[in-house]
Amino acid sequence: MKSKQRHPIARSYLDGLAARGEFLFASHQLQASLGISTIAAKNALGRLARQKLVGSPARGLYVIVPPEYRSLGCIPAANFIPDLLARFGLSYYVGLLSAAQYHGAAHHRPQEFQVFLAKNRRPILCGRVRVAFLARKRLAEVPTQSFNTPNGTVLVSSTEATAIDLVGYPHRAGGLGNVATVLSELAEKLDPDKLPVVAATAPISWAQRLGYLLDQLGGGRKTRPLHEYVRRHAREATLLQPKSRGRARRDSKWKLDVNAKVEPEA
């Protein structure tokens, strides 16, 4: 009989959290608040999960799932990632295609929520919500912007930082063709003077590729400061398409061996 009475009590606990705007909690918090055993807490959470009232993005951690997200079995990643990573003491920013969406480039909806950390970490699967973590050197130096979410704010790479990361991780952004498509949508928002600043947080080859692609997309007027940065720092030519052995022609402006034809989607 006691176990049957735990479910309404656990539901009341969730309602109390939601009323305070808290949607992420640990199993031990529920256990302490309800004054129940570890096993009873586990059973209560199991029942709530089967009813899709909670999802679990990490071991021992749960999110409250409102009715509008029950089909996902979780809330959107942006709604819980900041709090979850804060619990782990990890700095982060949302990047690549996920960041591009925040900046208005929504040509392709990413299949995963892409987050940069200082070190690699295993992906998260919460219901149908997948979060991929990527390692980024000099993470703390990458410029970010804060965007509002229903549960607070989330840090997203700036437009310029998003652009430089896209050419640095084309394999995680649908390939160079898709990168070019996204860059064509971001180009008007890029601040030319900020491009060398973000370039300094990444390998020089990323700046070479980005400058070339922006020129090809008709954004040459915005690449002058970036070109000056490349002129001063690039010691050797690099490939447009990394690890490709195709025939290449030299682009002397960007010290780039163009070994692939890149066209954005119409």
Image (spheres, rainbow, N blue to C red):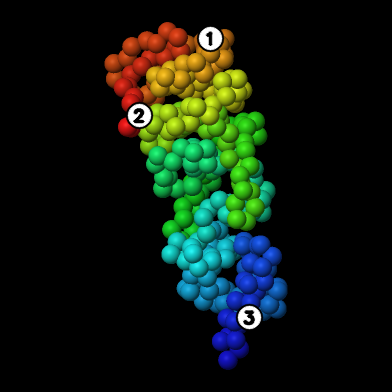
- Per the image, label 2 sits on a secondary structure element best described as loop
- Kindly state the secondary structure of the residue where label 1 is placed: helix
Nearest the eye: 207 or 36: 207
Q: Which residue is mark 3?
A: 9
Callout 1: few (<14), some (14-19), or many (20+) C-alpha neighbours within 10 Å?
Answer: some
Residue 20 rendering spot, x and y as whole percentages? 69, 65
**What residue appears at the point 53 percent right and 53 percent down from the top-left corner?**
77
Closer to the observer: label 2 or label 3? 2
Asked if the residue under mark 2 is in contact with the one under mark 1, i.e. CB atoms within 8 Å, the reply is: no
Residue drawn at point x = 37 percent, y = 10 percent: 250
Q: Amino acid at mark 2?
A: Pro
Label 3 near label 2: C-beta < 8 Å?
A: no
Quadrant (top left/top right/bottom left/bottom right) for the N terminus: bottom right
**Mark 1 or 2: the one toward you:** 2
Q: CA distance from mark 2 to mark 3?
A: 55 Å
Is residue 246 found left or right of 145 in the rendered image?
left
| Tally of numbered discs | 3
Residue 6 numbered tag: none
Residue at x-position 29% and y-position 16%:
247
Q: Quadrant of the C terminus?
A: top left
Instruction: Give neighbour class at mark 2: few <14, some 14-19, many 20+ (Cα, 10 Å).
Output: some
The amino acid at mark 1 is: Arg
Which residue, given by chain and number where applicable, does mark 2 sit on? 264
**Location of mark 1 (residue):** 231
